[in-house]
Image: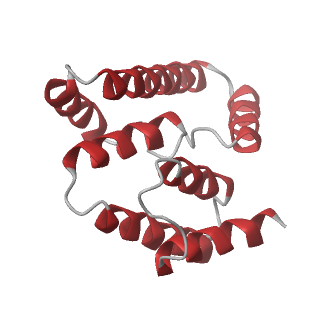
Amino acid sequence: MTIKRDARFALAVLVGKVDRSDPAIPARLAIAKARNRGRDDLRGLIDRAVSAHAVALGGDLAAADRAYLRAMGAGGVNMFDDEVFGRLATIHARRKNDPIAMALFAFAAEAFADAAIDGAAAVLAGGATRNAIHAAQRRAGGHKE
């Protein structure tokens, strides 16, 4: 049932059946993407919906920054990607006087720190513990690594 709901929502975003300026869209799509790991067909649809949402923002850089921070906080960004830290630094420099962006930044930074701790725990843990951590994260819809 969840797979169908995720697919319907992604399709609705893609074809414009929902208000693409809704600030909850990035988080909902990020959660749907995390929930559907291993389903490349559905993840492709979700990726296209994310792109449609970005286009709908129409070059509004502030909205794009807020959407990225929301996606980070919701676990929809690979925290171990090399570009994440640089993008966070750029967003912080650009939005340091925007209280809403800074609240989202704190949310995203906390998720980033949690991912770093999870990553360190996985490196230090034995194989069985590492597998248990990954299984728990998948069930919670959290970070991949």
Q: Position of residue 84 (x, y in %)?
A: 30, 37
The N terminus: image quadrant: bottom right
Look at the picture and state if 124 lies above or below 56: above
Rendered residue at 53%/48% (across/down)? 24
Total marks shown come to 0
Rendered residue at 30%/60% (across/down)? 57
Left or right position of 122 against 92: right
Q: Residue furthest right?
A: 1
Which is nearer the eye, 13 or 38?
13
Which is nearer the eye, 67 or 3?
67
Q: Position of residue 139 (x, y in %)?
A: 77, 42
Q: Position of residue 89 (x, y in %)?
A: 20, 27
Rendered residue at 57%/70% (across/down)? 10
Q: How is the image coloured?
A: secondary structure
Left or right position of 49 against 121: left
Q: Quadrant of residue 85?
A: top left
Q: Quadrant of residue 59?
A: bottom left
The C terminus: image quadrant: top right
Q: Quadrant of residue 143?
A: top right
Residue 14 visible from this viewpoint:
yes
Residue 40 visible from this viewpoint:
no
Which is nearer the eye, 80 or 106?
106
Look at the picture and state if 78 lies above or below 89: below
Rendered residue at 66%/60% (across/down)? 36
Q: Residue furthest bottom?
A: 15
